[in-house]
Image (cartoon, rainbow, N blue to C red):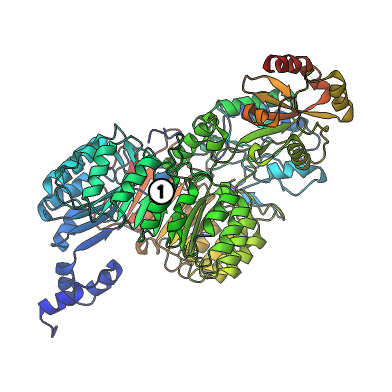
Amino acid sequence: MCPFPDEVLERVLSLIDSHKDRSSVSLVCKDWYNAERWSRRHVFIGNCYSVSPEIVAARFPRIRSVTLKGKPRFSDFNLVPEDWGADVHPWLSVFATAYPFLEELRLKRMAISDESLEFLATNFQGFKSLSLLSCDGFSTDGLKAIATHCKNLTEFDIQENGIDDLGGHWLSCFPETLTSLQVLNFASLNSEVSFEALEKLISRSKSLRVLKVNRNISLDQLQKLLLHAPQLIELGTGTFMQELVSDPIKDLKNTFGNCKKLVTLSGLWDATPLYLPVIYPACVNLTFLNLSYATLRSGELANLLSHCKNLRRLWLLDTVGDKGLEAVGSSCPLLEELRVFPADPFDQEIFLGVTESGFVSVSHGCPKLRYVLYFCRQMTNAAVATIARNCPDFTHFRLCIMNPGQPDYLTKQPMDEAFGSIVKTCTKLQRLAVSGLLTDRTFEYIGKYSKNLETLSIAFAGSSDLGMEYVMGGCPKLRKLEIRDCPFGNAALLSGLTKYESMRSLWMSACNVTMNGCEVLAKERPRLNVEVMKDEDGDGSQAHKVYVYRTVAGPRRDAPPFVITL
Amino acid sequence: MSMSIEEHDYIGLSEANMEKKASDITINKDLNLKATELRLGLPGSESPGRAAVNGVAIKNLVAGAKRGFSDTINGGSGKWVFANNGGSEVDSVKNGGLFCCSKVENKNSGSVKETAVLASPKPVLLENKSQVSANSNLQASSPASKQQVIGWPPIRSFRKNTMAVNQTKNEQDTDPKLRSGCLYVKVSMDGAPYLRKVDLEVYSSYLDLSTALEKMFSCFTIGQYGSHGAPTREGLSESRLMDLLHGSEYVLTYEDKDGDWMLVGDVPWDMFIGSCKRMRIMKSSDAIGLAPRAMEKCRNRT
């Protein structure tokens, strides 16, 4: 019996935010389970099908904030057919009754219709904060509903969604009375908004800390906006190029200098050496610089980075080349995260971009690196070994050698030793994405050495079932495994029999798994949903796309005809 | 997202093309036939000393001294992008003939991905013309119309679409100052198995460019040009042309905005970089026909 009064326990527990900690708390005893469920304000659901909205509402009566993730990650790359599911509406229906005071909704890879957005806007009076990332199914009309009806809106964060952009009128729907906005992000919406409406909105939103505009906002317009909002902490600019030079340079430089709190800068579309220097006064405070939409060359980058000594996170396009990365290594000693995206990923003839040497340069200068996403066209085992030695603290290592199955370009060997050196040296590794020519050896290393690995992405790799078996036999903390185009068959699939219930999900597509194998899995593990997506061609015995996940909600009731739950 | 989900293998060619290429391959004597033998082995069966991809052995990419260029290409440099229509013959040759059979998997029980990756050795470029037309094929089609491996490289749609727009914008911009600092044009060379792309903004003169190209296509020589290539009253003189032609086996030509092929060096450098769409290092014997047109154009311009 618990000696604490419930109220005290609840008060103490209410200070715990991490959902992992809360999960642990709820397992202590029945009293703690109850205290935890009454005090929880935010629920995080990593797979919307792992639980049903009714179950959530029954367990947690006082939720104010929900984070919900839907489709498998490979849906970002068009591997999941449309109408697969992850519709948010069933959740909203339940929440309307259970959580009428819901304030925050953060959705990732969910399907949302305009009707759902309107429902959200009109059924939750105190609704404050909407974040949509990588969702689809809605249009700007749905956004109009949110803008119109949510009187207390503080956050409007629309990022990279499959949205039907019917125009920028939604922005003009924010009422004149709305003054509470803190976050406004419409960088990935392509239509033009009314600048007049935007300027007025910014000038009356005194608490605004995050503003990310889209490419249509010119430099002149940006200047005006920044004058109204020098308190910004995060800024995403519009286009950084201007044809009519009305000499905004000096003014802009001053304005940026006045934004003393700015720590994050992004946008910078079309940035050229002409206008880039206007941000120099703000650079010294920057901790996150996103240049992944600016086609900068090495020289421009080097000049810019010489002002950015405090950078922790840097996103780039590979137009900066290895030389640009040398500048990163020499200018940013505190760097923790680097992402290098390809400017031209589909052009076969370009022998440009970055190579192993750029990555090595960065590793020499930035020993605190823990998160890397690197797209390149050539790599060597030796280079990666050097990188691992220089940066043993990697937690996230995502290397994409863009040509599938490409070996070490110098030795012609598979890239096994590269990833071997990473998993052996970087003991804190949580997330790994592999590429290049890989045999089962790579997976032997992964299974043996990565004790903390939680997320693993594999494509065009491996030689046999053994590869996946190694992973399933090791990696004690594995939660998410996504595999495409690998020679792993039923034996491999079934080697994970004891593991899948401790994982969030498994995705396998274009592998050697058959329906029989999936049926066996489903039979052995009734608490998993084993879903197979049918391929139109083919004889039906192959399981072309397999999605396996643990659930307490039973088989999906909304599965489309091409999804078979076994 | 409007992209229709059409399943393609990692290199999506139709079966019709497959048969055609199979016959092409057998003709070529350089080929180590055993190494490129189509094996329908079960996944996991791997012959020693060979790297396996998707359970089927692929040609050992190191073998063969002759493979200099082709190694670079065949070394997995993803021949996984083809122009529309499942790849013409030109495409296959250009890409070194690496491909795999699509949809074979469904006819064989036991292994889904019968990915037969057959590498031809040094890709024989059949004809200069076809190479040029392949170039124009690829240039004409926007990235979205190319048949690609679905979802690879793993880049989100928003970024893909944005980059595609960037490319178009770059091509449309006329004021060099406003360009985002790069002016990439393709350079092809007759007989070379792959193209290069160069950024014309990086060079300040024809000499610069010539030197750089020489380095890039290092086995070949390019004729020397005058320091500014400034048009004299006569335009391209006969004697100068003969110097070029006799001075080397190859000449450097370019396609200008009107679609005409010109000899490099005729116009001032700035005008050149403003009008050059792509370049081709062609055999001087093929270049003779260019001279009269080049002279005419010069006269029209000055």
The residue closer to the viewer here, A333 or A141, is: A333
Residue A69 placement (x, y as % from top left): 31, 52
Residue nearer the viewer, B35 or A104? A104
Give the x, y percent position of residue B54.
58, 48
Give coordinates of residue A262: x percent, y percent: 37, 58
Report whether residue B210 is seen. Answer: yes
Label 1 marks a residue whose chain is A
**Position of B54 relative to B287 (above/below):** below
B287 and A397: which one is in front?
A: B287
Spot the residue most to the bottom.
A3
* Residue A116 screen position, x and y as percent: 20, 41
Q: Quadrant of residue B188?
A: top right
| Quadrant of the image occupied by residue B201 | top right
Is residue A441 among what the camera can see?
A: no
Q: Is residue B7 left or right of residue A141?
A: right
B54 to A67, vertically: above or below: above
Q: Quickly name the residue at label 1.
A: A252
Disc 1 is placed on an element classified as helix
Tell me the quarter of the image containing the N terminus of chain B.
top left
Left or right position of B170 against A349: left
Q: Outermost residue toward the right?
A: B246
Q: Residue at x 82, y 40 (%)?
A: B219
